[in-house]
């Protein structure tokens, strides 16, 4: 019996020693100590041992089992430690490697220009408001003194949703919406997207942006308009910038004008940028037509005001010396990053 136990132990020790995975170790344990294991079958044959020898043999069996269990445990601990070390080694972080840079986007030139314009007007006490891009014919044309058969409607041919709902061709309808609220005085700018049935080229797009301006109060005159827009131009294009107002026609203002600024490239001397004239046109403006005030429920005897409309792309193109409007819509990061 003793010899048999010694043989089991020796074999077990050899197996454990040469074992290199947890699975194999487990198989060894089951093969020796399991229900049908070698050592268990020795225990089962105890009944053949004479009663006086049983305690002795029992002790041998227990000693053998303990030794084998200890060896298995030691081997398991060793393997677990090795596994843990291998895992740590595999997951090691080299803190000296350069960090992954998060790609950060870039503000669009339109956005930069808009924020600049907003900053200037907010600084003069204006509120920034918005109106809908899908607009009623009434707000886009009718209430701005552009009746059904007015030729200005052809110039701003647009995308109709139904007979009287359309994509706005200008931000001017926001003027009407503001005036209709009846809250006086008004000092607002309204930036936003507008639409026209234009072919795409270097200076046209079926969708672009405008910034509308409106001031309504008592005793507002053309002098306020000039002073405000001249201050705006100096802030935007530099202190030396001069402005010039040319008579123009817009149905919703009377009188109306277009404002030019001295070319910021040549300071008015005339260059390629301003096509030799020294001046660059930047906006339309005028005194709000009394009929427009009346239609929106404002008494033109009590109140007067001025309005203006700026093309946002035009400002962005001028400010950043971009010569093709299409570049603004391609969203090429290499282009956008330059501003
Ligand atoms: N809405 C005009 C356009 O799209 C621009 C404009 C001109 C707006 C004069 C105004 C203004 O408010 O007073 O051509």
Image (cartoon, grey):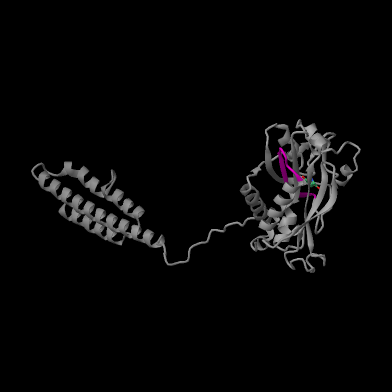
**In this rendering, would 310 be left or right of 337?**
right
Q: How many marks?
A: 0
Is residue 75 found inside the magenta-colored segment of the image? no
Measuring 34% from the left and 60% from the top, which residue is drawn there?
A: 85
The chief SS type of the magenta part is: strand
* Span shown in magenta: 206-221
In the rendered image, residue 137, in percent from the top left (x then y), is placed at: 82, 36
Residue 147: tell me if it is visible. Answer: yes
**In this rendering, would 11 be left or right of 251?**
left
In the rendered image, residue 264, in percent from the top left (x then y), is placed at: 72, 64
Q: Nearer the viewer, residue 226 or 186?
A: 226
**Up-down: is 160 above or below 60?**
above
Which image quadrant is residue 75 in?
A: bottom left
Is residue 212 found inside the magenta-colored segment of the image? yes
- Kindly give the residue lying farthest to the left in the view shown: 52
Which image quadrant is residue 272 in?
A: bottom right
In the rendered image, residue 176, in percent from the top left (x then y), is placed at: 75, 36
């Amino acid at each position: 019996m003793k010899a048999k136990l010694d043989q089991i132990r020796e074999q077990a020790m050899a197996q454990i020693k040469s074992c290199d995975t947890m699975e194999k170790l487990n198989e060894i344990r089951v093969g020796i100590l399991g229900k049908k294991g070698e050592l268990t079958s020795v225990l089962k044959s105890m009944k053949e041992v004479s009663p006086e020898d049983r305690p002795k043999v029992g002790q041998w069996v227990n000693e053998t089992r303990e030794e084998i269990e200890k060896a298995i445990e030691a081997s398991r601990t060793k393997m677990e430690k090795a596994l843990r070390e291998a895992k740590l080694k595999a997951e090691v972080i080299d803190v000296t490697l350069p960090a992954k840079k998060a790609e950060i986007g870039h503000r669009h030139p339109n956005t930069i220009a808009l924020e600049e314009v907003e900053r200037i007007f907010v600084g003069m006490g204006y509120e920034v408001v918005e109106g809908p891009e899908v607009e009623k014919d009434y707000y886009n044309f009718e209430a701005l003194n552009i009746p059904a058969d007015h030729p200005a409607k052809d110039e701003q041919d647009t995308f109709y949703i139904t007979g009287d709902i359309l994509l706005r061709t200008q931000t001017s309808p926001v003027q009407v919406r503001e005036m209709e609220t009846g809250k006086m005085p008004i000092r607002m700018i309204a930036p936003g997207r507008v639409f026209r049935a234009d072919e795409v080229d270097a200076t046209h797009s079926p969708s672009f942006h405008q910034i509308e301006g409106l001031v309504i109060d008592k005793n507002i005159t053309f002098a306020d308009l000039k002073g405000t827009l001249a201050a705006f131009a100096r802030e935007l294009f530099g202190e030396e910038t001069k402005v010039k107002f040319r008579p123009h026609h817009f149905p919703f203002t009377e009188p109306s004008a277009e404002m030019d600024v001295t070319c910021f490239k040549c300071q008015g001397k005339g260059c390629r940028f301003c096509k030799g004239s020294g001046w660059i046109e930047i906006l339309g403006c005028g005194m709000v037509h009394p009929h427009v005030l009346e239609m929106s429920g404002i008494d033109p005897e009590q109140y007067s005001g001025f309005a203006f409309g700026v093309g946002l792309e035009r400002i962005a193109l001028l400010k950043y010396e971009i010569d093709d409007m299409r570049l603004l819509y391609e969203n090429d990061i290499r282009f956008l990053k330059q501003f």
